[in-house]
Structure formats: structure tokens, C-alpha cells
Amino acid sequence: SMEKVEKTKNRVQKMIAAGWFPNGHIDEEQTTLMLTEETYRLYLLAEDAKRQRQAEDARQKTEDASPAGSGDPELDEAIREGRAYIRQIRRVNDAIPGEEISRKISQLEAVTVRIFACVEKRPGKLPDIRRFMSYYLPTTLKLLNAYQEFDSQPIQSQKILSAKEEISHTLDTIYQAFSSLMDTLYEDDILDIASDISVLEAMFAQEGLTSSGDFHTEGSPRASSGK
């Protein structure tokens, strides 16, 4: 009965307090008694990892529930799909311990996030990432999954090492291609800014605000040359 369970919990807690189990700990649910510090340390690590997974899952569910709030089903579906790819890339990265390959995967994740962020703000760019979504991302994820599979093998044969090296090298090319795509998405904005700067500089020069290199208030006398 519940009463017996509570009595048992209280009895165990009193025994721990009295020093019967010097290294004894009870878990958060108060259902398990751990008798060593090592067991308790592993339990705490497992609980921390569990909380991190729960927080990540809750965050992802929130994002997936309203990916863009645009009212455009096609855009919302693209953003949902993009976030799913990003999530898979991140999980593969977490599963691969190598520092150099992890850095490359993190770069790919970051540029992919920026690409979808651009499209989310500028829905008119969605047609520009069709091939990116239908081929580039799936193929990249396939390569990452293959690397993870090769890396997990207990015996790293020369063929496996060569395959991993080839994938790692290809990730550099993929990152360059994704970066170029991102630049293309912002190309119109870059041209608009360059045009605005040119017009602004021309107006400054016409008003005499930059001809002498000194910015002065309209109507104020220019610095005298001493003549």
C-alpha cells in the first residue's frame, strides 16, 4: 500500500541520515537507493542529459507548431522541412566525437540556418532554394550519416579511413556551395545598398559636404586656408 511505501522511504532516509549508508542517495522519484558515489554521479549525468533532451524536444515542438506564421502553406512547409534537416544535422554532429569534422558540420548547420532564415523573411526567395532542399540537403545528410556509420566501426580499416577523409573533404566543397547560395539570396539587397551608398555620396558631394573631407553644418563657414 502507499502507506507502507511512505514508511519505507522515511525509514531509508533516516538510515542514510544516521550514517548506515555513508555514500547512499535516493533518486528524485524516491524509488531507487544508490549505495555508491559513482552510481549517484552516473545517475546525475543521466538526469542532466534527460532534461537537455526534454528541453530540446519542447523547443522543437514549439518551432514546428508555428514555423513561420506566414499564412503561406508552401512557405510554412518549407521552413518545417528545413528545421527537420537542421535537427538531423545537429544530431549527427552530436554523435560524432571528432573535433575537426564536428567543426565542419557546425559550419554547415550555421549556413543552412541562415539560408532558411533569409527565405523565411523573404518568401519570394523560396523558388531559389528548390534544388537546395530537394537534392543538396538530402545528399549532404546522407554523407553525414555515412560518416557517422563509418566512424562508429570498432576497426578503422584503410578503406573506412579513406572514405571518411573523402567525405570530410567534400564537406568543404558543400560549405562553399551553401555559402555561395546564401550570397545569391542576398544579392538584390547588396545591390540596393550599394546603390543607396552611391546616391548618398553623390548628394554629399553636390552639397559640398565631403569635397574637402570635412563634414560641416550647412551655412557654416569653411575652414580658412589663412588667405
Image (cartoon, rainbow, N blue to C red):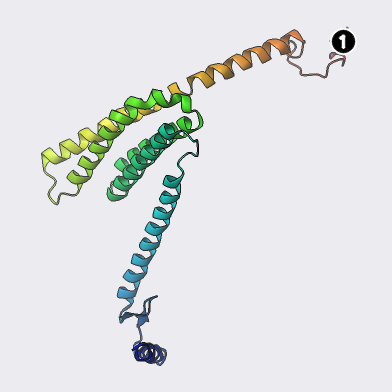
Q: Residue at x 68, y 10 (%)?
A: 202
Q: Position of residue 9 (x, y in %)?
A: 37, 87
* Closest to the observer, 223 or 178: 178
Q: Position of residue 146 (x, y in %)?
A: 20, 40
Q: Position of residue 135 (x, y in %)?
A: 28, 29
**Figure quadrant of the C terminus:** top right
* Closest to the observer, 227 or 92: 92
Q: Position of residue 100 (x, y in %)?
A: 31, 41
Type of residue at label 1? Gly
Residue holding disc 1: 226
Tell me which corner region of the image, top left, top right, bottom left or bottom right, holds residue 207: top right
Circle 1 packing at 10 Å, graded few (<14), some (14-19), many (20+), is: few
Q: Residue at x 36, y 36 (%)?
A: 108
Residue 104 seen by the camera: yes
Q: 195 above or below 129?
A: above
Relative to 52, 225 lies left or right: right
Q: 37 above or below 20?
A: above
Residue 19 seen by the camera: no
Tell me which corner region of the image, top left, top right, bottom left or bottom right, holds residue 119: top left
Q: Residue at x 53, y 20 (%)?
A: 190
Q: Secondary structure at mark 1?
A: loop
Q: Residue at x 35, y 26 (%)?
A: 130
Q: How many marks?
A: 1
* Closest to the observer, 155 or 4: 4
**Figure quadrant of the N terminus:** bottom left
Q: 188 above or below 84?
A: above
